[in-house]
Amino acid sequence: MKNKSFQCQIFIFFTLAFAQVQLQIPPAYIVQNTTGCLFISLSESITDNCSLWILFNKEPLCILADLHKTIPLVDIDQNYKGRIQCSVAEPYNQASICFTTGIQPSDAGVYAVRLFKPPGEFITNNTLHVIGQPTKPIISAQSSVIAGDVSTINCSSVSSSTLSTGHDLFYTWFVNKHLVSGHRYTVSEQGGNELTINSVLKQDRGKKIHCLATEDEGISSEPSDEIVLNVLYAPEIVIMPSKNVSVYLNDSNLQLVCSLIDANPASKLVYSWTKDGLKIGSSQNLTLKTIKRSDQGVYQCLASNAAGTSLPATVFVDVLYAPEIQTFTLIGGQIVNELDSFVIVCSIRSPRPGNITIHNQNTNETVKIGYNVYSVNFIENSAQCYQTASFVCLAGNNIGRTQSHPLDLYVKCRPRSMDDLYFQTLWGKHITFSAMYLAYPRPSIAMTFRKFSTAPDVSVSTALWDIAIKPKNISAFSINIKRDFLTSEQFGFYTVNVSNDQGFFAATLFIRPRDKPEPPHNISVMCSVARTAILSWIPGSERGAQQTFLVSYNTPNKRAQDNHTVFGNSLVISNLKSRRYIFTITAINMIGQSQSIQDSCTVRDLEKESCPLKTVFGFLFALFLLISVGQITFILLTKFRQRYVNRSHIYTQNAETALVNITHAYDLENVHASMSSRTDNQMEASRLSCTYEDVDISGQAHSTQNAETALVNITHAYDLENVHASMSSRTDNQMEASRLSCTYEDVDISGQAHSTFLGMTS
């Protein structure tokens, strides 16, 4: 019986154990000082006669009976009243204990339920974990990190939960109060306690980093203390002045400053200066006291601190100066043969390209020029005699100019005349011959003589001749030959041979005794201008003596003639009459005169032909004025006609008497003027005084006073009516008479009396 009872207990034990495994509810995790419930599963279903106890540390907290009733009987331990509530949920087959006030770490532990159900009892349990706040994390890192390196930061905290949960703490990282993000930041694992900053930047300096620790199922810790990143980095520098520096040669005290922009640490910096890669200084400032050409170059500054060395700061110092002639030479030799080749090379030393000119000083010619270059070459493939000269190289830039020493080039060539003078005729006993020659080397002179062109040449002793060879430059020579008092036997053909080791040049001088001049030729006479003849001709040879020209002219069948002496080859004769003239031109020198040449032309007075045309235009203009004045006058005379009608007869008689006196005075004066003082100039002035409308009486000064006296009387005698009558009575016949009164020589006033009278009356 006992054995059967023991077997039964074993069976029940294993059954209960299996039921607990199958019905186990996960432990409860309740944060400290908060409320929550712990659920414990029941291994058996609840029936009417069941009751259960909820135990903590083997002490009952709650006793529940009458479970089948709607409101079961609940008895809570005196120490837990007001803190907990116990209940059974039949549908879920579980019991619960809920904490209605803040749960404390002492509440953590294993809670058991003992279910009394006939024929036995069943025990199940569950664990309550009270989650506390993790301790404040401790953050740690290197005190400083060099830019570019990797920085590792650690965060550590401890769980304060009662009954350890066995869960890891989860860490959260913040940079400047923002969650860490970006590829440069790496956390050791999800929620890990190690933060890595890959390749720390200069800009990371001063960033603040902190962390939080959070337990699973629980709350986060308070933030850790912040750490401030101290990033060390190499100096950042610039040279002042920062742009390229241009200075003039021999300037003084150029200072270059290695200026610090940023560095950490910014103390105990070490500076270094180099020029074109060579170290020249170790202070922050570099001073160039007196600028030399060698100071031009690339200057670099470096600065170093505990974190490293800066990138180099660079500036270029440009030393400005006028270009210097570095090379000025001849390739091919200083002496070359004609038609050989040569090259003139000029190169400069200058801070920047310049303008280079190769100049021929003898011909004042620029043979080569280059712009913005360092060298130029003048290439001549065929040397010419005139290129024997002194050359210079000129170079300049915006700073100044320089000139080389002369470079002499000698082109060996036979003599040749610069004037292409092969033959020249000279006259008289006293001979002077001058010519320019090109030659190198210096030429010599030999002369031969022949009396006639067909006679043989005879050598002439140059000792009897004054011969001078004067160099104008290296290859140009002036040759002067003089001889006085040649006899008649010494007139003839002289050959002047100018020669050197390259060849010769021969010029023939035909020396002749002086003779009378050759006649002029190609005479031209034009008479198209009024009363004027224009003559021109081509002179013949003077034949050794200066010549003048005698120009004479007369009319056919008349011996009387006028003569003009002319030193040139043209003449203008004015104030001629309208007729045909014969012009004769003769050349004269101290030996005699040439044959004469003649030509003729007819002089026309164009003004005479144009006078009727002027008169017509004058008439039309005067007629227009008369009609206009007449209309105005008619209106005025209508009003005053009656007033002056009785006095008009008396005034008319006085006016006629005055006109008789004027006519008589003018006739006398005209006769006197034409008999006594009539000149060509007065005739020309009289001709020109013929105008479109009136005849000018300016040449008759003697009659002016008498006419003015008479005209005063006329002015008082004639009234406006008589003026109108006289203006309207001027007919075409009177205009024609006025035109016919215009003569070539004198001015007829008879046609002007009526017009003068009208003008003075108006």
Image (spheres, rainbow, N blue to C red):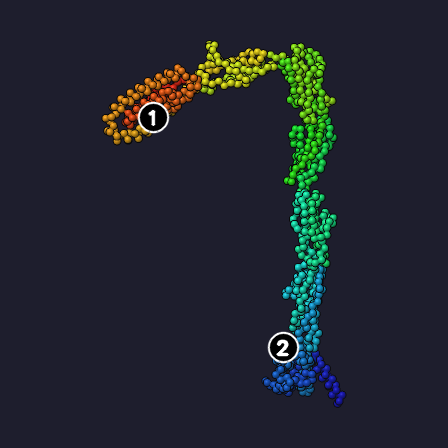
- Residue located 70% across and 43% down the image: 293
Whether residue 58 sits left or right of residue 564 in the image: it is: right
What residue sits right under mark 1 in the picture?
759
Image quarter of residue 226: bottom right
Front position in the image: 662 or 225 = 662
Work out whether 751 lies above or below 24.
above
Q: Quadrant of the C terminus?
A: top left
Q: Amino acid at mark 1?
A: Gly
What residue sits right under mark 2 in the picture?
34
- Residue located 63% across and 65% down the image: 178
Discs 2, 1 touching: Cβ within 8 Å:
no
- Where residue 456 sits in the image (x, y, percent)? 70, 12
Work out whether 144 lies above or below 9.
above
Q: Quadrant of the N terminus?
A: bottom right
Image quarter of residue 671: top left
- Residue located 67% across and 41% down the image: 321
- Where residue 395 sits in the image (x, y, percent)? 67, 36
The furthest residue to the right: 3
Work out whether 613 lies above or below 263.
above
